[in-house]
Image (cartoon, grey):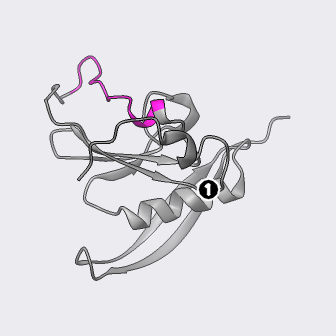
Amino acid sequence: MAVGTTIYTFTISLADDDQGVYENFELKAARHPSEAEDYLVTRVLAYCLDYAEGIAFSRGISDPGEPPLGVRDLTGALRSWIEIGAPNAARLHKPPRPRRGSPCTPTKTRPRCNACTRACTSNAPGSWGSMRWAGR
């Protein structure tokens, strides 16, 4: 018999003076049976570090074209792409494309990209050196 997804509930008291964010909320995060505990904790920490209106977890491994965490505006356009773990450089530079029937339209502006790593691996920042970065 297969083990199902486990839902964890976190009570968060967030106080970020730099961004002027002061929130108290409960966060529910689903953990797939194949997901490591440290990856789940990294996802929750990334959620807190990048907290903004419109932040949400993706559908996870069932939707590999989406970021694990994303911030969308009220029109549904992706404003922030947040990767967890040690993504390769090509994934960080992959431009998001709107889906069919999606309310977001392609624009010349790309969403902000962020990576929250939980361990140093061969895909971590050392392999990103050959990529061109245009950041803020």
- Secondary structure of the residue carrying tag 1 is helix
Give the residue drawn at x 28%, y 61%. Answer: 52
- Highlighted range, magenta: 90-102
Q: Residue furthest front?
A: 130
Q: How many marks?
A: 1
Residue 75 coordinates in the image, percent (x, y): 15, 39
- Asked if residue 62 lies in the magenta stretch, the reply is no
The quarter of the displayed image where residue 38 is located: bottom right
From the viewer's side, name the closer residue of 44 and 59: 44
What is the chief secondary structure element of the magenta stretch? Answer: loop
Foreground of the two, 127 or 4: 127
Mark 1 sits on what residue?
A: 40
Give yes or no for residue 93 being in the magenta stretch.
yes
Residue 108 to residue 40: above or below: above
| Residue 105 x, y percent position in the rendering | 15, 26
| Circle 1: residue type | Leu
Question: Which quadrant of the figure has residue 23?
Answer: bottom left
Whether residue 62 sits left or right of residue 24 in the image: it is: right
Q: Nearer the viewer, residue 121 or 116?
A: 121
Tell me: residue 124, above or below residue 95. Answer: below
Q: Residues within 10 Å of mark 1 (few under 14, many from 20)?
A: some
Q: Position of residue 69 (x, y in %)?
A: 42, 47
Q: Residue at x 61, y 40 (%)?
A: 123
Q: Is residue 1 left or right of 88 when viewed as pictured?
A: right
Residue at (58% x, 49% y) in the render: 85
Q: Is residue 11 above or below residue 95?
A: below
Residue 20, position in %: x, y?
Answer: 22, 78
Tell me if 26 is positioned left or right of 71 in this view.
Answer: right
Quadrant of the image for the N terminus?
top right
User: Residue at the spot x=23%, y=37% of the render?
Assistant: 110
